[in-house]
Amino acid sequence: MDWFKNLKVGNKLGLGFGLTLILVTTLSVISYSSINSMIQTSGWVDHTHKVIRVGESLSASMVDMETGLRGFLVTGNEEFLEPYFAGDKQFKTLVQKGAELTSDNPAQVKRWANVADMKKLWLEKWAEPQIAQRKIITQGEKSLANFKQVSARLLGKTLFDGIRVKLATLDAQIPKNNLHEKLLSNQALLALVNMETGQRGFLLSGVEASLEPYIQGEKDLLAAVTELTKYSDAYTKNVNEIRQAVSEWQTRVANVEIDARRDMNKYPVTIENVIADMTKGTGKHYMDLIRAEINNIVAAEESLIVIRNEDQKATATFANNFTMFGTLFVVLLSIVIALLVTRTIVGPIQKMRDVVAHVLKSGDLSSSVDCTSKDEVGESIIAFNQLINYLKKAVDDANRVIADIANGKLDTRIKADYSGDLLMLKKGVNQSAESIESVIKELSRVMESMKNGQFNLSLTAAVKGEFLTMVNNTAETTQSVNASIRAIIEVMNAMQQGQFNQRVLVDAKGDLLTLKNGINTSMDALESAIKDVITIVLAQSKGDLTQQITHHYDGELGVLKKAVNDTTSRLQEVVARAVNAADVVNSASSEVAQGALDLSQRVQEQAAALEETSSTMEEMSSAVKNNSDNAKEASDVAQKVKAKSLEGSRVMQQTIDAMNEIQDSSRKIAEIVTLIDSIAFQTNLLALNAAVEAARAGDHGRGFAVVAGEVRNLAQKSADAAKNITSLINESVSRIDQGTKLASDSGAVLTEINEAVDTVTDMIEHISIASQEQLTGIRQVYTAINQIDTVTQQNAALVEETSAASESLNEQSSTLSSDMAFFKIKKY
């Protein structure tokens, strides 16, 4: 290896770097080829993910159609069909796009066609017939009034559309290449749709199990958006807005509609046909087929992802192994080359460094460097050895002078002959020895005085140049230090007594100036902070919570500022919420009081109407009883007609008159029954209104809601009894008409009266029986009216209690508002 050792340094480095560069180039070419292969495989994987996203979007469009259909079937409002039509339009686009993406896969293309066919069957067999049927269903059932009022609101659609917009904003924020985060965004959207689907399903069926998609969808939605925040803090704001929007939708729409549907389950519904069709499961059957086929498409693409991931993994493994072993080989070769270069270049330099280190460490200049190479390094070492020997002699002379000075012998000088810089070293050492001798003697005197605490002494040494400057600076330093120390002591004493306006005013330079400025700056910051805190506390004691510390502070003063501002802001928030709560309670209590007053007036009017009805029924009962007695008498007279044929004409005329009176009474009874039916209808409406007001009153209205329910039941029973009475009266009127006609015919054919006596007797007996039945029905109506009157009185008492409670609540909220008015806060 002597040939390599004698090469010039440039040739050695060129040979080593050249070999390394060739190997690195080879390694880079093969790595590039492997990476290019992985990029192609990744492109296919991305293509597969696009197909999967199309399948998931297709499923979401079907869910939108189903959601829009169910919303329309529940409400009958065609605005709820917007998701249905939008989903239908999007479905066609997505099927075409999916077929195009998988055009190289006949099996997948066939599956897309199957999905389109199944969707067509779903439309023909289920969706379109249901829409047509729902359009002709009447919406006027009284028992659905409350539910329709809640479910027909557009607030749910508005809030739900807002949630969709927020999810779309979050999805747009996610980079396109972040596939997993895109998947989480899609899962959140599907979970939201499932929540609405479960909620709408429950609104249709009323079965609690239908709420499972709603409950699970809420969990899945929160889990998806929570996991998104783990990838980037940038999503946190949108995620929090989505959570708040979903909570608002649940509070103001979903839970309200669910509670209304649960309340509706207590009473008969009027969309039995739609519910019966849904119970058959026709729509669910076709929808399940569509979901299954879409799942087959996604499953096929997921299997392709596994295969392509394995290919990508194999390529990555080859690239990693080749890169690792190739890099290891290059590193080993580089180490070998570096060792050779180090031994030929760095080795002699290392020896020279060791000699220099030995000289620096031990001060021994007798060492030299051994080197046999003939390159630039060897030549440099020979010159270095000569320099060391020459320096050794000069240093020995200077050491001798310095050693004598160190030993207190200040008159030793260098006397040998030198040239150049070493001559200057000789003169400098000798002159320095002389100046040091003079200055040290003078400084010894000054230091002795400073040791005794005297800083006002002056130096009188006969020196010049830097030594004179040093002497003067020493004197000035002692005076400046003395003045600064006294000024700082004065400021610290003032601060100890609670005075923060004192400052260090003495002139200073250098570190003393820095010390002065630092103390003054600290005092300024401390004084400002104390004043700001005092200002805030005084304002708070007067009820003003709008004041804030606006100055900037660092360190612990900054922490104090933040704590004071945060405390003030928190107090503002608490007071603001208390004020808002008081206003809301005050408004609500006023509405409850007004509602109770209106209800009280209606109950009083109802009680008066019931009293009049009761009086009328008593009169009618007496009239019917008289009719029954007359009918019995007429029957007795009819038995004597054969013996009193001469008086037949007169008796028949009386019978006809009696029939006319009965007919007039029956018509009056019919009018009274109609009035009773109207009263029952109004009572039912009042009971429904009372139930609504009780629901608004919350826990305080539960008892009133129970009473309202009982009133409604009694009103329903009254309506049913009125219908029965109407039927009886109609039958009685019919029979009376027949009797009147027969009596008239009997008067016309009085000569045949003997033959018709038996028939008249039978008719009179029927009239008597009908009169008895009529009397029984009227008594039942009278009893029902008395019961309604009792309940009405109870309602009046409950209304008075509700009014008193609302007035008390109003007084409490007014007191709270008055207390909070003491504080002054910012308006948001």
Image: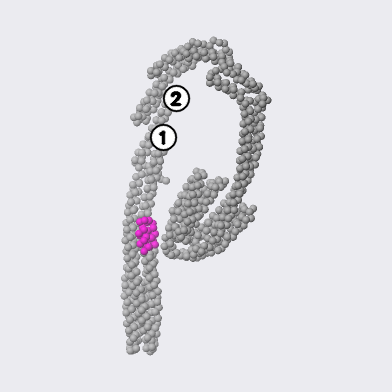
Q: Secondary structure at mark 2?
A: helix
Foreground: disc 1 or disc 2: 1
Q: Residue drawn at (49%, 57%), measured in percent from left and top? A: 197
Which mark is on residue 54? none
Amino acid type, residue under disc 1 in the picture: Glu
Which mark is on residue 511? 2
Whether tag 1 and tag 2 are in contact, CB under 8 A, the answer is no
- Residue lying at the far right of the rendered structure: 3
Q: Nearer the viewer, residue 22 or 218?
A: 22
Q: Nearer the viewer, residue 138 or 325?
A: 325
Which contiguous range is marked in magenta?
Answer: 687-710
Figure check: 742 above or below 152: below
Circle nearer the N terminus (1, 2)? 2
Q: Residue drawn at (37%, 34%), measured in percent from left and top? A: 530
Does residue 166 belong to the magenta stretch? Answer: no
Q: Position of residue 783 (x, y in %)?
A: 33, 70
Q: Position of residue 423 (x, y in %)?
A: 56, 13
Q: Is residue 467 visible?
A: yes
* Left or right of 306 on screen, residue 545: left
Count neighbours of disc 2 (C-alpha within 10 A) and say few if under 14, some if 14 to 19, many if 20 or more.
few
Q: Nearer the viewer, residue 501 or 564?
A: 564
The N terminus is located in which quarter? top right
Dominant secondary structure, magenta: helix
Amino acid type, residue under disc 2 in the picture: Asp
Residue 691 occupies quadrant:
bottom left
Count neighbours of disc 1 (C-alpha within 10 A) and say few if under 14, some if 14 to 19, many if 20 or more.
few
Q: Which residue is mark 1?
A: 556
Residue 718 occupies quadrant:
bottom left
Q: Residue drawn at (54%, 49%), measured in percent from left and top? A: 183
Q: Nearer the viewer, residue 154 or 116?
A: 116
Q: Is residue 87 visible?
A: no
Residue 419 occupies quadrant:
top right
